[in-house]
Amino acid sequence: MRVRINPHRFSGEIKIPASKSHTVRQLLIASLADGVSEIQYPLDSLDARSCVSACEALGAQITEYRAVDPCPNPQDEKGEKLIGWKVRGNGNFSGKVRSPIDVGNSGTTLYLALAVAGLQGEPVEFTGDEQIKKRSAAPLLEALAGLGVQSCSNNGCAPITVKGPWKGGKVSLPCPTSQYLSALLIASPLAPAGVVTEIEVPLLNEKPYIEMTLSYLKAHGVLFEAAQDFSRFVIPGGSSWKAFSRSVPGDFSSAAFPAAAAAISGGPVTLLGLEPEDTQGDKFFFEILSSMGCDIQWRGGENGRSLTISRDSPLRGGTFDLNATPDLLPAAAAVAAYAEGDTALVNVAHARIKETDRIAIMVQELTKLGINCTELPDGLIIHGKGALSPPEKYPVIDGHGDHRIVMAFAAAALGSKVPVEITDAQSAAVTYPGFLSLLDAVMLG
């Protein structure tokens, strides 16, 4: 799908979709628990639906309940919306696992479910879309092999087949993506009593996502030992995940895109549904915007907290370490295109192993809009000019099938001197189905 974004000021009150990271974790944990769990106000996106399908294939029974959203965004379609899932867990893997399991575009689902499937003795195959088939799980598979889990793959990429049982032991797991470690932390407590999993972590990117995963272990009373710097974990088997009922908080990763749109066009934009105390690392984006010259205001209210972003003065460049928050790179680069002076986004080499090589692609596509960039091994420098004046009358941005690339350039287009077209725009639905409608995108087919 191709869309056109016409430049305009973006303002209003926006309800942020639920966190993908929390939604996927809750679905898998509920599927591993005994009893029925309720996941309230989850993310309803392509990635979330892929996780639901994977959990059902692993033996969970999931039913959804819907109702009319009492606080919809004005651009949302009318009618009933998903407001929750009831999940009957299958922690003992009774019944046959349905294989192959298709995870679609969801890397989080793939990595976490790989470890879960390694707990039982039958082979389980995982596959996904073309992007997933290019994303290597080799470090995770090597660690699983050290714990007794057999695997067969295409050089670490899907299709991947794993087969337990989980025997425990000591392994080293470098984590260019934190999802490898989260996978072991979620699965290893379910190993048999007496089986101990010890994990040495010589490299850990995206530390806040590990803090998120550990918050679930703590909430469920799962035993573990962790070094203060997260370089070592010890998890005894014999624990269990418990049925639960909880809401999914708003997604700071998704919130970055309407926030970027506000920073670029001036706003004001008020975001609803975010919890400032949540473990999500991507709330760092609002520190970046404040440093670049935006006004950021948290306010309390009867219906919860709200966050307003606006800007009345020029944006200024800066240097930002994105090691803990690589998903922010596309949105931050889009804002930096409008800053006066250089903006360096650094220590984020792992942005190259997401759905796409986001460093190279942001350099490539920003150049089409007349922005000079310097590509670094671990990031990029955007040489901002305070404005965006594309050299072509109707520049066309390649979305590369990457939801965050598409949304970043949709936000960037708002301040352009001319309309901007974006291909592969349907990819935004992976995490934020309504975002392009919020920007009044014109669908071109």
Image (cartoon, rainbow, N blue to C red):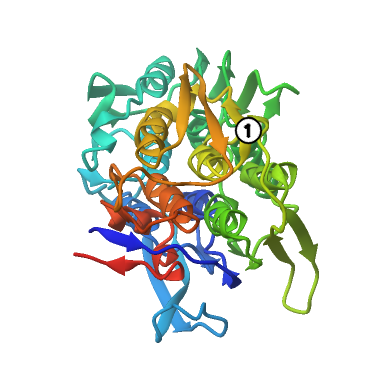
Q: Is residue 186 left or right of residue 229?
A: left
Q: Pinpoint residue 222: horizontal percent, then vertical percent.
A: 65, 40
Residue 306 visible in this rendered orientation of the protein: yes
Q: Nearer the viewer, residue 240 or 173?
A: 173
Q: Nearer the viewer, residue 135 or 392?
A: 392
Q: Is residue 404 above or below residue 421?
A: above
Quadrant, the N terminus: bottom left
Image quadrant where residue 151 sits: top left
Residue occupying image coordinates x 29% and y 53%: 394
| Amino acid type, mark 1 | Gly
Q: Nearer the viewer, residue 32 or 156?
A: 156
Q: Pinpoint residue 112: horizontal percent, then vertical percent.
A: 43, 38
Residue occupying image coordinates x 48% and y 46%: 388
Q: Pinpoint residue 48: horizontal percent, then vertical percent.
A: 40, 56
User: Which residue position holds label 1?
Assistant: 341
Q: Is residue 381 above or below residue 112?
A: above
Image quadrant where residue 101 sits: top left
Q: Is residue 4 above or below residue 70?
A: above
Q: Is residue 36 above or below residue 240?
A: below
Badge 1, how many Cα within 10 Å: few under 14, some, many 20+? some
Q: Is residue 24 left or right of residue 255?
A: left
Quadrant, the C terminus: bottom left
Q: Nearer the viewer, residue 435 or 374?
A: 374
Question: How many numbered marks appear?
Answer: 1
Residue occupying image coordinates x 32% and y 29%: 135
Q: Is residue 259 left or right of residue 77?
A: right
In the image, farthest residue toward the right: 300
Element carrying mark 1: strand
Q: Pinpoint residue 400: horizontal percent, then vertical percent.
A: 28, 42
